[in-house]
Amino acid sequence: MIDFRDVEKAFGDNVVLHDLNFSVQKGDRVTLIGPSGSGKTTILRLVMTLEELTGGYIFVGGEPLTHEERGGKRVPVSKRNQKRIRQRIGMVFQQFNLFPNMTVVENIIEAPVHVLGQSKREATLKAKELLERVGLSDKAGAHPTSLSGGQQQRVAIARALAMDPEILLLDEVTSALDPEIVGDVLGILRNIAETTDITMLIVTHEMQFARDVSNRVLMFDGGKIVEEASPSVMFSDPKHQRTKDFLHAVLGDGEDTIGTR
Amino acid sequence: MIGISAAFEWHWSAAAEVLPTLLTQFVKVTLLVTVLGTVIASILGLVIAMAIRVLPRPLSEAVKWIANVIRMTPIIIQLLFASYAFLSLDLITIGVIVYGIHYATYMSEVYRAGIDSVPKGQWEATTALSMSTLRTWTAIIIPQALRATIPALGNYAISMFKDTPYLLVIGVVDMVNAARIYGGDTYRYTEAFTLVGIIFLLASYPTSLLIGRLEKRLAYKT
Amino acid sequence: MDEKFAAIGEAMPRLLDGLVVTIELTIFGAIAAFILAVILGLAAASPAKGFRIPARVVIEFFRGTSLVVQVFWLFFVLPLLGIDLHPMLVGVMALGLNYGAYSAEVVRGSIQAVPTGQWEATTALSLGPIQRMRRIIFPQAWALMIPSLSSLLVHLMKGTAIVGFITLADLTYQLEQVKRTAGTLFTYGVVGILSYFVFALVLMYFMNALEHQAKHKLGQGKSLWRILSPAPPASTPAGGAS
């Protein structure tokens, strides 16, 4: 579904991703873990075309997303193609990024109506369903600024799902939330993971969530994948010293890894 | 300095005589140019701000410099230039255009700041939702930018209002010029100019209070 | 085109005379405005009603009535009172009063924008009100107010162009004398616009330099000397005297 081939990303002289090669299969739930600054979020932002790819290629469903090789040269793909492919991808942000000048339901139907060309009625009906799914049916007419962080993030999830994405990118979606409401949001995502076959690429510090939802975990450090495993292996029996150190740091001093908690 | 000249004494008859003329010219010239000038300035200002943001580098730099030149040179010179450049247009039209363009360069700065104040995450969300450029501007960026800019735009409208007397350099008989002419004819400058000052004060002070309150209300909500 | 340049060249002495009047009005007007702004601004920022209310009345009065009205009032009405001022003084007074009132708001806003902690610290150190303002608050407010003051300075400069109507031969007045021989569009559109624009740029650079210096005194940014020196000296090694 997503193929990273020789991907390189540099901000000026600062190379954050180097020689990155990995693939995400359809229906995969891949969690990226690692210390901050290791380039995890950059990967999501590259897939969403929020950052410019400085080297290599990303393929989505076999099609080049930003650049392709033609006649032995790396050339950018047309903007139209890029837009077409991008419509298959949805993203939920750490800071929600709801549009404050629109109500909750207007936020959700904005893209279905104006990008996919759905009728307002059709889109609103679907938006109501999605709001029910995230437990906010009574907030359709509310303004985002009147909602709590957890509620805003649930709206943002509904907004991303309204586009029926094949790929969902979750960028530290609980990092800006108060600890007591993190569970609600993760519960909703867990439910979506169980009831759909959306391909998910997840960056999170919630190891329990990563363990529950994902089928693969990639450990990043210094812009490279240092270890890749299923969650059960990664969290109970990491091989690489960097992974051990990282998990030890985030999970605390206890000898137990989360698997046995 | 022996005694106060008789012409300085306040004559209600003179005040009553000049007031209707002043009020007529206030509505027919001062207010008209301010309102139409503000409409042009607020639209053109947004166009300039967007052009600077959207156009490729050499062009956007050129727009920026032209705007700087217009903003940093006297409106009086611009009025004189335009009155000779567009001889076929009537003077009020020239006034509206010059004030509109001059203040558009100020308002473009306000819009630019407003556009810059829209968080980066908003732009990113529009990308994540595959929204078109046009829709991004009209549905997301401009509505949010506008909210922060309305008070500042209002203050520039008041500035424009107070700058309208410069119109006398191209021979327009606005309220101040009418007072000057009346004073020249009758030597009753005291009544004429004092009334003009009071009219300016009565029109601009409550408006600026209103804008101040609007500013506070808009600021609390977001 | 050549004739136009020739006409301008011929008229250069009188254009320069006009420019000198414009520059004088700008500088003296700005000085008068600044003095008034500090007095009114401090009074408006004062907690004492006895200072604050009169200051507010004066500020709103001179902001609310147009500059042109003030110029004409001083020029046409004062003589009727028996006060005959030189037109130059009228120009400087009107510019000073009008832009002084605008600048007073900037001064007030900047003084009130200095963080509360700074005010509290002066109280904790038992500094008197004058010492507090002069040594602690005003230097910090000064750095904050310069950007707004510099745009007001350009406004003031643009406002000087009205003085032709009170018999002063400023640049705009002299351009009008030249326009017949040099062509109106060239005179106003090129010579006039360019002269005023260059003058405005000079004013802006001056104010920018002031701002850098003010910030440097607060420990932010480089010193004026370092900015102006063509080849900045090599940075002193770490740990050197500062």
Image (spheres, coloured by chain):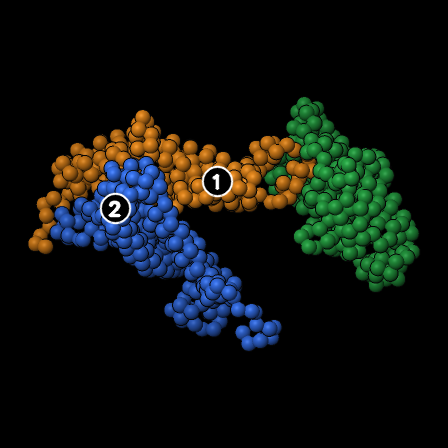
Chain colours: A green, B orange, C blue
Say which residue appears at 69% left-offset and 24% top-offset: A118
Percent coordinates x, y for residue B160 in the rendering: 36, 39
> Which image quadrant is residue B208 in?
top left
Which numbered circle lies on residue C161?
none
Percent coordinates x, y for residue C87 in the rendering: 20, 51
Q: In which quarter of the image is the C terminus of chain B?
A: top right
Identify residue for label 1. B63
Say which residue appears at 60% left-offset and 75% top-offset: C239
Q: Quadrant of the N terminus of chain B?
A: bottom left
Judged left or right of residue C96, residue C209 is right
Percent coordinates x, y for residue B151 in the rendering: 45, 42
Say which residue appears at 23% left-offset and 40% top-offset: B195
Q: Indicate the chain on which mark 2 is placed.
A: C
Kind of residue at disc 1: Val
Relative to B30, say whether A218 is above or below: below
Relative to C197, say whether C131 is above or below: below
Q: Residues within 10 Å of mark 2 (few under 14, many from 20)?
A: some
Kind of residue at disc 2: Ala
- Total numbered labels: 2
Say which residue appears at 42% left-offset and 69% top-offset: C135
> Which image quadrant is residue C173 in?
top left
Judged left or right of residue B165, residue A24 is right
Percent coordinates x, y for residue B64 in the rendering: 48, 43
SS class, disc 2: loop
Judged left or right of residue C57, residue A90 is right
Judged left or right of residue B187, residue C141 is right
Nearest to the observer: residue B66 or residue A205:
B66
Identify residue for label 2. C11
Q: Is residue A65 visible?
A: yes
Q: How crowded is mark 1: few (under 14 residues within 10 Å), some or many (20 or more)?
A: some
Q: Can residue B221 be seen in this view?
A: no
Residue furthest toward the front?
A: C2
